[in-house]
Image (cartoon, helix red, strand yellow):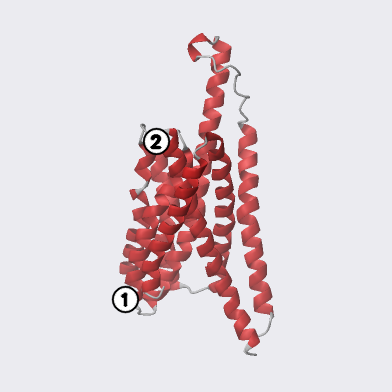
C-alpha cells in the first residue's frame, strides 16, 4: 500500500468521529437523556482506558520477556516503565493542573439562593447571573475539548498501527484496522459531547473538537508508515490513559448531582460493551 493511500485511509478512519458530534446540537434532550448520554460516554472512555493500558503494558512486557530469555538487559524495561509513568502522570495530573489554572481565571460567583426568575433581578444581579452561566458553559466546553485531546492521543497511536501494517505490506491487516478504527471512532464522538450537558456548542467548536480527536489518526498513519517506534507509541498510550482517567472522574462528578444514577450506570455498562464490540472488529483482523 502506498504512502498516499495509507494517509487517505487514515483520514477516513479518523473522520468518522464527526458522526456522533452533531448530537450536541440537539435542544430537546431531557435531564435523564443527558445523564444517560454522559454515562454512555464514560463507559466508552472506560473501555479506552483499559485498551490503552493493555497496549502500553504490552510494549513494556515485550522487553521484559526479552530480558527473561536473556536476549536483552533490564535497562530498556526500566526506561520504558519510567516513560510510561511520566506520561501517565502528565496525562492525569497535567490535565488537572491546566483545568485548575483555566478555571481560576473565570471563577464563577456562587449561584443565587432562592431560584429567583431573571425577570426579577436588578441589572447588577443579572450581570452576575450571566457571568455564572458563562463560566459554567466555558468549563463544560473545556472538559469536552480535554476529552477530544485525550481521544486524539489514543487515536494517534491507532494511526501508528495502521501506518506500520501498511508499510510492512500487510494489506489485509491494514484494511481491517482501518474499518475497525473507523467504527470505533464513530462511537468516540459521543464521548466528547456527552459531558457537555445542556451546553449547546457552536458548529465551529464541534469542527475543532472533531479535528483534535480524529485528526491524529490521519497523522499517526503517516508517521507509522515512515517511523516505527515502540517508545513513541508507549508515550501516547500513557498520556491518553492518564487524561482519560481524569475525564472519567470529571464526568462522574458532573452527573451525580442530577440523579438517575441507576439508569446512568446501566448506560455506562452499555458504553463499555459498545467499545468492546467495535474493538472485536480490529481483533478479528489480528490488530
Residue lying farthest bottom?
A: 70
Residue 126's spot in the image, x, y percent?
54, 15
Residue displayed at 62% across by 60% down: 88
Is residue 55 among what the camera can see? yes
Left or right: residue 202 versus residue 48 is: left
- Secondary element type, mark 1: helix
Q: In which quarter of the image is the N terminus?
A: bottom left
When asked about the image quadrant of residue 174, the answer is bottom left
Q: Find disc 2 in the rendering and name its residue.
A: 202
In the rendered image of this protein, does residue 47 appear above or below residue 35? below
Instruction: Say if residue 148 shows up in the picture.
Output: no
Horizontal side, residue 235 vs residue 226: left or right: right
Please say if 109 is above or below 94.
Answer: above
- Residue 231 in the image: above or below residue 245: below
- How many marks do you count on the picture? 2
Please tell me whether mark 2 sits on a helix, a strand or a loop. loop
* Residues marked 2 and 1 touching at CB (< 8 Å): no
The residue under the point 56% across, 74% down is 59
Front residue of 273/124: it is 273
How far is the residue under mark 2 from the one under mark 1?
A: 39 Å
Q: Is residue 217 above or below residue 195?
A: below
Q: How crowded is mark 1: few (under 14 residues within 10 Å), some or many (20 or more)?
A: few
Around disc 2, counting alpha carbons within 10 Å, would you say few (fewer than 14), some (14 to 19), or many (20 or more)?
A: few
Residue occupied by mark 1: 172
Amino acid at each position: 500500500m502506498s504512502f498516499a493511500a495509507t494517509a487517505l485511509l487514515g483520514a477516513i478512519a479518523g473522520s468518522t468521529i464527526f458522526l456522533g458530534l452533531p448530537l450536541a446540537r440537539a435542544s430537546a434532550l431531557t435531564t435523564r437523556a443527558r445523564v444517560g448520554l454522559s454515562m454512555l460516554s464514560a463507559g466508552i472512555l472506560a473501555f479506552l482506558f483499559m485498551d490503552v493500558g493493555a497496549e502500553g503494558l504490552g510494549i513494556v512486557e515485550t522487553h521484559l520477556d526479552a530480558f527473561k530469555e536473556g536476549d536483552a538487559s533490564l535497562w530498556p524495561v526500566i526506561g520504558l516503565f519510567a516513560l510510561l509513568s511520566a506520561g501517565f502522570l502528565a496525562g492525569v495530573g497535567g490535565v488537572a493542573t491546566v483545568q485548575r489554572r483555566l478555571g481560576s481565571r473565570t471563577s464563577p460567583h456562587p449561584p443565587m439562593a432562592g431560584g429567583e426568575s431573571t425577570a426579577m433581578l436588578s441589572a447588577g444581579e443579572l450581570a452576575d447571573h450571566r457571568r455564572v452561566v458563562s463560566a459554567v458553559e466555558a468549563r463544560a466546553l473545556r472538559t469536552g475539548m480535554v476529552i477530544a485531546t485525550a481521544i486524539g492521543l489514543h487515536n494517534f497511536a491507532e494511526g501508528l498501527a495502521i501506518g506500520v501494517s501498511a508499510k510492512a505490506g500487510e494489506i489485509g491487516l491494514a484494511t481491517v484496522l482501518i474499518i475497525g478504527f473507523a467504527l470505533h471512532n464513530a462511537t468516540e464522538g459521543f464521548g466528547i459531547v456527552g459531558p457537555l450537558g445542556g451546553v449547546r456548542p457552536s458548529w465551529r467548536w464541534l469542527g475543532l473538537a472533531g479535528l483534535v480527536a480524529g485528526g491524529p489518526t490521519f497523522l499517526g498513519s503517516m508517521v507509522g508508515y515512515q517511523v516505527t517506534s515502540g517508545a513513541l507509541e508507549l508515550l501516547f498510550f500513557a498520556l491518553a490513559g492518564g487524561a482519560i482517567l481524569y475525564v472519567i472522574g470529571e464526568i462522574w462528578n458532573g452527573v451525580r448531582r442530577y440523579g438517575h444514577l441507576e439508569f446512568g450506570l446501566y448506560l455506562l455498562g452499555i458504553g463499555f460493551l459498545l467499545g468492546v464490540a467495535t474493538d472485536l472488529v480490529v481483533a478479528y483482523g489480528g490488530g
